[in-house]
Image: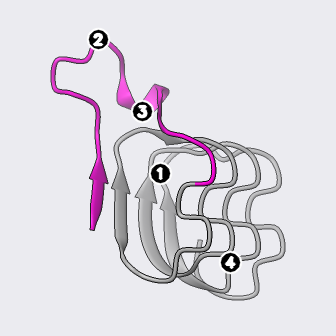
Amino acid sequence: MIAVRPPAAAAYRAEDSVIVGNTVLYGATSGRAFFRGIAGERFAVRNSGASAVVEGLGDHGCEYMTGGRVVVIGPTGRNFAAGMSGGIA
């Protein structure tokens, strides 16, 4: 399991800030991940088994997923879930 959050004393709002960069969980096959903030582009592309929760993400998130589950609590960028053949987003 991975959990990423900003420090408690952060001077910014996590839900409005990028907390993890591009291609996080690219090709993930298992596990759980929780992100308190926004992910960059191509989040969980080709995910085949991981479960994740994130507060928003950039363009091309969840492309070509074949399995796993992704919950996006906030906005998504362009081309979200294009080419998915399995999994739940």
Residue pictured at 83% horizontal, 75% vertical: 83
Closest to the observer, 37 or 75:
37
Specify the amino acid type for callout 2: Ala
Distance (Cα) linking label 4 and label 3: 24 Å
Closest to the observer, 51 or 76:
51
Q: Position of residue 76 (x, y in %)?
A: 66, 47
Q: Which mark is residue 73?
A: 1
Distance (Cα) linking label 2 and label 4: 35 Å
Instruction: Say above or below: 40 vs 12.
Output: below
Specify the amino acid type for callout 1: Ile
Bounds of the magenta segment: 1-23
Distance (Cα) linking label 3 and label 2: 12 Å
Q: Position of residue 1 (x, y in %)?
A: 27, 68
Distance (Cα) linking label 1 and label 4: 18 Å
> Left of 64 or right of it: where is 14?
left
| Picture quarter with the C terminus | bottom right
- Residue under label 4: 65
Q: Secondary structure at mark 1?
A: loop
Residue pictured at 61% horizontal, 56% vertical: 43
> Left of 64 or right of it: where is 55?
left
Distance (Cα) linking label 2 and label 1: 22 Å
Specify the amino acid type for callout 4: Met
- Residue under label 2: 11
Distance (Cα) linking label 3 and label 1: 9 Å
> Left of 10 or right of it: where is 26?
right
Instruction: Say above or below: 31 vs 77.
Output: below
